[in-house]
Amino acid sequence: MLPKKVHKEIFLDDKRARVPSYKVVLGEEELPRAWYNIVPDLPEPLPPPLKPDGTPVKPEELEAIFPKEIVRQELSTDRFIPIPEEVLEAYRLWRPTPLVRAYRLERALKTPAEIYYKYEGVSPPGSHKPNTAVAQAYYNVREGVERLTTETGAGQWGSALAFATNLFGLKCTIYMVRVSYEQKPYRRVLMQLWGAEVVPSPSTRTSFGRKVLEQDPDNPGSLGIAISEAIEDAVTHSNTKYSLGSVLNHVLLHQTIVGLEALKQMELIDRFPDYVIGCIGGGSNYAGLAYPFYYVKKMGKAPVDTKFIAVEPTAAPSTTKGVYTYDHGDTARLTPLLKMYTLGHDFV
């Protein structure tokens, strides 16, 4: 214990002193115990995944690449799905994450609005992605899977899965878009430090990768190509499954822990957002934050008419410029057909 005199020199003891509160922090005991599933609260049922012949994909067919519990969650209509204790234990390494008041941004914008953001950068890989990576790794190891494959672009999702598989003792193979593999060596090193094998894509490891390289030896790669390689690897090896970091229902489900925490944090400071704004690519970042607030509004419990704004890059404007139709999620067309806003499965 510090001597009183030293303590006073270091710490502000006057409880009446007014200092701006930047962060709203929850205790570990306040961690949400269930994820929120938006599916039962949508205005209409989601179109089912289809096989190439146009018939719906059966649940057992999805089990070729996903564990049974992930398939169950993907198709579930339960509003809340309990979080296993083993996943909660892993979450406690960095969760709950802080809700931060952006005072400096408010001043820079000269706005009377209060701006808050949920800071997910405190996770070991530095993003929101471990929220689903940890859950997926847990469900796979529980079903006896020994290795996971996946794709990554800049390395954010790959880092998260490498971290999660390291926690649960799984092997991990990551197909990283070649141009990012060469331009972002630090993310690659981070994945390797967590024990993952990182392969530049397109590669000679898969038949589809070899086909791409035959046509263009200098192909820089794309997420679509990397997904194809990861899926091919998974379905051609025993005790191996594929893991996806965005887009699908179960991924968005796991990310709602972000918004559920934010709901509690806003409640603690007697606030509710007029707008919930976030960036979208595959959707997991924005869904994780927005879905719980949507639920409160849908149930008629929101004190204001909250608006939801999703922002996407002009470089890949799938929702603003894409066509809403069935398409494959990868270049080799190995995935089921999914109803989506798409720029085409071969878009680079």
Image (spheres, helix red, strand yellow):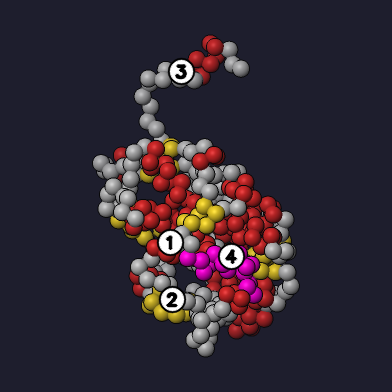
Which residue type carries mark 4?
Ile
Tell me the tag on residue 17.
none
Q: Report the Cα–Cα distance between label 2 and label 3.
A: 59 Å
Which residue type carries mark 2?
Pro
- Residue lying at the far front of the rendered structure: 78
Q: Position of residue 259 (x, y in %)?
A: 44, 51
Q: Residue at x 60, y 78 (%)?
A: 61
Q: Report the Cα–Cα distance between label 4 and label 3.
A: 50 Å
Q: Earlier in the sequence, mark 2 or mark 1?
A: 1
**For residue 6, what is the image quadrant?**
top right
Tell me the tag on residue 70.
4
Q: Report the Cα–Cα distance between label 3 and label 1.
A: 45 Å
Look at the picture and state if 213 lies above or below 92.
below
Q: Nearer the viewer, mark 4 or mark 3?
A: 4
Q: Does residue 291 show up?
A: yes
Q: Which residue is mark 2?
A: 47
Is 94 displayed left or right of 252 in the figure? right
Q: Report the Cα–Cα distance between label 2 and label 1.
A: 15 Å
Q: Earlier in the sequence, mark 4 or mark 2?
A: 2
Asked whether the beta carbons under mark 4 and mark 3 sit within 8 Å of each other, the answer is: no
Label 4: element kind: helix
Q: Earlier in the sequence, mark 4 or mark 3?
A: 3
Q: Position of residue 98 (x, y in %)?
A: 47, 41
